[in-house]
Image (tube, grey):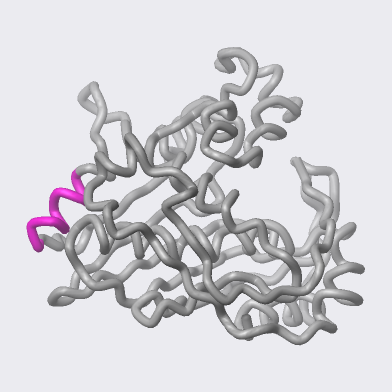
Amino acid sequence: MKQYLDLCQRIVDEGVWVDNKRTNKRCLTVINADLTYDVANNQFPLVTTRKSFWKSAIAEILGYLRGYQNAAQFRELGTKTWDANANENEAWLANPHRKGKDDMGLIYGALGRAYPKVTGGSVDLLKNIVDDLSNGIDNRGEILTFLHPGAFELGCLRPCMYEHHFSLLGDTLYLNSTQRSCDVPLGLNFNMVQVYVLLALMAQITGHKPGKAYHKIVNAHIYEDQLEPMRDIQLKREPFPAPKLIINPDIKSLEDIETWVTLDDFKVEGYEHHDAISYPFAV
């Protein structure tokens, strides 16, 4: 929590106002932030200075790992986070590549599970990484990327957290995740959970111990209509100790994640939190 609150305070104190064309809102912005999550010691980075709906964050990362590209699939998993971008984004609604209600297009997991090859066909980046790590292989390029600049028009939103690089040292797995843009009051609450869960899950299904997850944010911002509740409410609250995340030990393969895993396979112990804060969401 300290590193999260330090970043929030830094944006309030040092941020520069930037106009965002996509949302037609101003953002108080800083460049470059680095956060670290101790997965080895189960220090689950769940925000405690307001209530965090962590199940929705986990549902979203599960959808990415399955390659989902439809908001209805995410709702079935337990999250409505893609409803607005799939169905209310005016540019996407007018896009001829949109396939109808709830379609998200070629984004996030849809790319990571079927990345187009220059020579035709596609490659399943995630499966290749799982296969390598399961066999103790680290080629220094075990990278799951959701970024394809040549395909931006095929999706409703450019990926924010666009790359996850796994590294194996002995029997310990590490993760470096890179995020180009972050809505800190709303998005970072989700993103911290997802980086942590991704390393924990990948270590578990490849037979390794989890180490630390390193999370780099390039553009960290607070929208103008989020500033007052962040500055006057959330930053004045004292954080509680970090809770622990319990993952069903029966999850042992990528196929398990693809077929039967649900939110019931994740539990949080010792989560104390302040009241929820209703931050506006920018589409």
Q: Is residue 131 on the magenta stretch?
A: yes
Asked if 177 appears above or below 114 in the picture, the reply is below
Left or right, 37 with reference to 229: left
Secondary structure mostly taken by the magenta-highlighted segment of the chain = helix
Nearest the eye: 220 or 255: 255
Q: Which residues fall within the magenta stretch? A: 128-136
Q: Residue 60 location in percent, x, y?
A: 52, 45
Nearest the eye: 256 or 34: 256
Which residue is at a point 52% across and 66% down the rendered structure image? 268
- Using the rendered view, name the quadrant where residue 258 is placed: top left
Q: Residue 151 location in percent, x, y?
A: 46, 30
Asked if 39 appears above or below 207 in the picture, the reply is below
Left or right, 247 with reference to 153: left
Please state the total of marks drawn on the protein image. Answer: 0
Nearest the eye: 224 or 229: 229
Q: Residue 110 location in percent, x, y?
A: 41, 33
Nearest the eye: 150 or 207: 207
Q: Residue 38 location in percent, x, y?
A: 42, 79
Where is the N terminus found, in terms of image quarters?
A: bottom right
Which residue is at a point 56% across and 80% down the rendered structure image? 242
Where is the C terminus found, in terms of image quarters?
A: top right
